[in-house]
Image (cartoon, coloured by chain):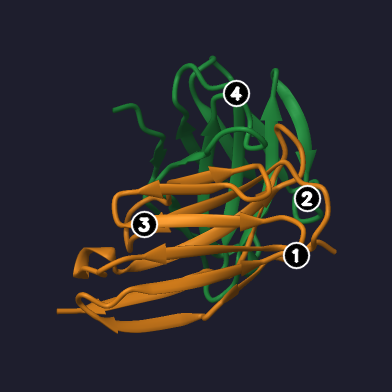
Chain colours: A green, B orange
């Protein structure tokens, strides 16, 4: 069964360092998303990506964040200069026709710890 | 601010008990309401996507209903089993491709 895969599963980084979280969405899906969950809080939306561009982003997704789909298969989230408050579980998701109609398929997440 | 609320926050039941959780949301136009099951160390897995008032969906022992006019959805589990232990997430989408707005989840623990 097709699945969304994320790497790495855990990442520990020093404050101020750049991190890249990687995702391989399901191949025929058109919509791609990043979400995160800070421990004890709700899962919160970061960004959605459709037709090779950002379609929506949250207030969290400031200039320190960027996304790319460099080669038609990978979907990456970059945090340029990490802060302690970026520590969270980051989830990639994809949807065949968008979550207004169909389910999202989530990866297992990358646990990012900023020290 | 669009807010999705789930209750209860956690639930402990015995194997064989039937249980239900609630998802409450602003009663306004939205595209779809999603239910996800999230086991520890695994990815959230979709249970249902519902769009119409009065929708009822069923998958095995799990079913869900949607009332868009009063702004709630119920998830029911009949005859809970230990393998049903997970966090159940409700989320709303307000346009076709847009973000999901999640509730805080209901953590279910089923004891044998």
Both marks 4 and 3 on one chain: no
**Which residue carries the number 1 mark?**
B70
- Chain on which label 3 sits: B
Looking at the picture, does residue B102 appear above or below residue B51?
below
Q: Between tags 2 and 4, which lies in front?
A: 2
Q: In the image, are marks 1 and 3 on the same chain?
A: yes
Query: From the viewer's perspective, is the residue at label 1 or at label 4 nearer?
Result: 1
Horizontal arrangement in the rendering, residue A42 relative to residue B86 (left or right): right
Taking depth in this image into account, of B56 and A61 the one nearest to the observer is: B56
The answer to whether any part of residue A18 appears in the image is no
Which comes sooner in the sequence, label 1 or label 3?
Answer: 3
Using the image, name the chain to which the residue with label 1 belongs: B
Neighbourhood count class around disc 2 (C-alpha, 10 Å): few under 14, some 14–19, many 20 upward: few
Instruction: Return the x and y of residue B33 as percentages of the image width and height.
Output: 62, 49
Horizontally, residue B90 falls left or right of residue B5, namely: left
**Residue beneath disc 2:** A58
Q: Cα distance, mark 3 to mark 2?
A: 33 Å
Determine contact: label 3, label 2, CB under 8 Å: no
Q: Which residue is drawn at 69% across and 24% down?
A: A50
Residue nearer the viewer, A87 or B35: B35
């Amino acid at each position: 069964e097709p699945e969304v895969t994320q790497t790495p599963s855990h990442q520990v980084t020093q404050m101020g360092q750049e991190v890249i979280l990687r995702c391989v969405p399901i191949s025929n899906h058109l919509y791609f998303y990043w979400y995160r969950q800070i421990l004890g809080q709700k899962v919160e939306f970061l960004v959605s990506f459709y037709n090779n561009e950002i379609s929506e982003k949250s207030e969290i997704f400031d200039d320190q964040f960027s996304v790319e789909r460099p080669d038609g298969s990978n979907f990456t989230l970059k945090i340029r200069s990490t802060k302690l408050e970026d520590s969270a579980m980051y989830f990639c998701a994809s949807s065949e026709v968008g979550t207004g109609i169909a389910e999202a398929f989530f990866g297992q997440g990358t646990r990012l710890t900023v020290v | 601010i669009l807010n999705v609320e789930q209750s209860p926050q956690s639930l402990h039941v015995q194997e064989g008990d039937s249980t239900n959780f609630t998802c409450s949301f602003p009663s306004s136009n939205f595209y779809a309401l999603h239910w996800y099951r999230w086991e520890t160390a695994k990815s959230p897995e979709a249970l249902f996507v519902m769009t119409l008032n009065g929708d009822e969906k069923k998958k095995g022992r799990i079913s869900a209903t949607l009332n868009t006019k009063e702004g709630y959805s119920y998830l029911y589990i009949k005859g809970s089993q230990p393998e049903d232990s997970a966090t159940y997430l409700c989320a709303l989408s307000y346009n076709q491709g847009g973000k999901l707005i999640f509730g805080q989840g209901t953590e279910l623990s089923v004891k044998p």
